[in-house]
Image (spheres, grey):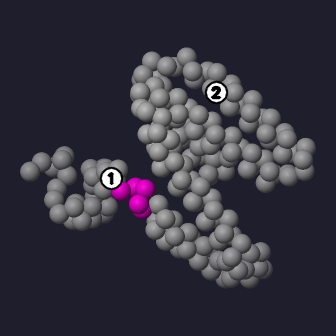
Amino acid sequence: LCFGAMGLAFGNFASIVLMTVGRQALLMPGAVLSAVAGAGFDLLAIRLGYGINGVAWATVTTYSVSGGLLLTMALTGLRLEPRRVLGLLVRLFLPLAVAIALALAIQRLVPWAGDPDMRKRALRLVTSMVTFGALYLVAVRPLAQGLGIRRVLSELNLPVISALMRRLDGGVSRQEGP
């Protein structure tokens, strides 16, 4: 379900852009289509016998496709050329695909799933978290370069993170001035 939240976030972002560029008339049909498709795919998953896992996958897929369609409409509303729209969609959705693939692989490869010993289960949790975090950062770092994440983090004025980001940047944030 956490992966579905990313699809919803893309859809919400696209909705703001569509309203900004005056194409809000597309939002209601998009929302209705998304709701009908989501309900239909959830029911299909149940009827095909996939149970709650099938419903979860149907929901993630519906949210992601809906978010992608809304983003496509938003980006074309900004008059971006089709190749640039496709590139941005890949850059936005690739981290989601990487996260899903890593989570599935780690779930299958890390031992002690369902072990009655709580220490082994805790070790599995920590091992999974550290492995996922490290692999995910390595995989998506190239996609995040040039987005200005360091500047945003430094200007949020978070106690530890802002100071660390300013030190890494070798300067001060714009809020602090020269």
As measured in the structure, the alpha-carbon distance from the residue carrying label 2 to the one carrying label 1 is 32 Å
Amino acid type, mark 1: Gly
Location of residue 149 with respect to 133 vertically, above or below:
above
Displayed quadrant of residue 20: top left
Q: Residue at x 30, y 63 (%)?
A: 160
User: Circle 1 — which element?
Assistant: loop
Circle 2 is placed at which residue position?
Answer: 31
Q: Residue at x 46, y 68 (%)?
A: 138
Location of residue 103 with respect to 49 vertically, above or below:
below
User: Circle 2 — which element?
Assistant: helix
Location of residue 169 with respect to 88 vertically, above or below:
below
Instruction: Please state the horizontal and vertical placement of residue 122, each as a whole percent of the image.
Output: 64, 77
Q: Is residue 107 magenta?
A: no
Highlighted range, magenta: 141-146
Q: Which badge, 2 or 1, is on the more N-terminal residue?
A: 2
Q: Residue at x 56, y 47 (%)?
A: 6
Circle 1 is placed at which residue position?
Answer: 146
Displayed quadrant of residue 127: bottom right
Amino acid type, mark 2: Ala
Residue 153 appears in the figure: no
Left or right, 145 with respect to 174, comes to right
| Residue situated in front as seen by the camera: 140 or 156 | 140
Instruction: Please state the horizontal and vertical placement of residue 28, each as a whole percent of the image.
Output: 61, 21
Q: Is residue 143 magenta?
A: yes
